[in-house]
Amino acid sequence: MQPELHQERKHQALHAFYQELLTLRRTIPTLTDPQASREVMGLEDERVIILQVHAWGGDAETLAILSFADTETQVSLPLLAGAWVKRLDASEPRFLGDGPVVPDRVYSDGRIELTVPPHAALLFGRTH
């Protein structure tokens, strides 16, 4: 343990990111619901992993997009219709990112097209 590392900006940003992940875990029931349906889709050529979680009892959906690509990637995803609100974006300046590229809200008619930044971690929740 090196407490002095917490004074460094990159360690503060990592700590803030972990804190945000823990907060989301506590506040988004679908992330911890053992009964929730989970669908993982890998877009191998794009180097993107998609996780969709649906809690059947609570009518709640969550979408996570993880990009391991070194460049921006265009993705086309099947997604339940409705408005989806961004809950996490690792590119935010508070996490030492370059700033968000993906909109705070996306609307799906059953499919969405997104430009995903390199090395992205995004989390969306569907609103009703």
Image (spheres, rainbow, N blue to C red):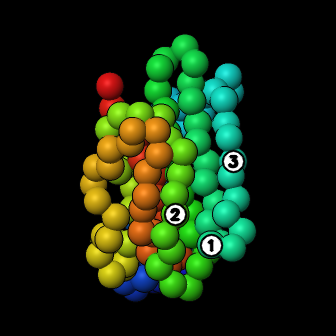
Q: CA distance from mark 3 to mark 2?
A: 15 Å
Q: Are marks 2 and 1 in contact (CB under 8 Å)?
A: yes
Residue 15 visible in image? no
Q: Secondary structure at mark 1?
A: loop
Which residue position is annotated with label 2?
75
Please name whichever residue, 128 or 112, is drawn nearer the observer in this view of the structure.
Answer: 112
SS for tag 3?
A: strand
Estimate the x, y position of residue 66 in percent, counting from the top left. 57, 63
Query: Measuring 32% from the left and 49% from the top, which residue is drawn there?
Result: 106
Q: Which residue is mark 1?
A: 46
Q: Quadrant of the N terminus?
A: bottom right
Mark 2 or mark 1: whose residue is earlier in sequence = 1
Give me the C-alpha separation between circle 2 and circle 1.
Answer: 8 Å
The foreground one among 14 and 88 is 88
Query: Farthest residue in the top direction?
Result: 57
| Mark closer to the chain start, 1 or 3 | 3
Q: Amino acid at mark 3?
A: Val
Name the mark nearer the viewer: 3 or 2: 2
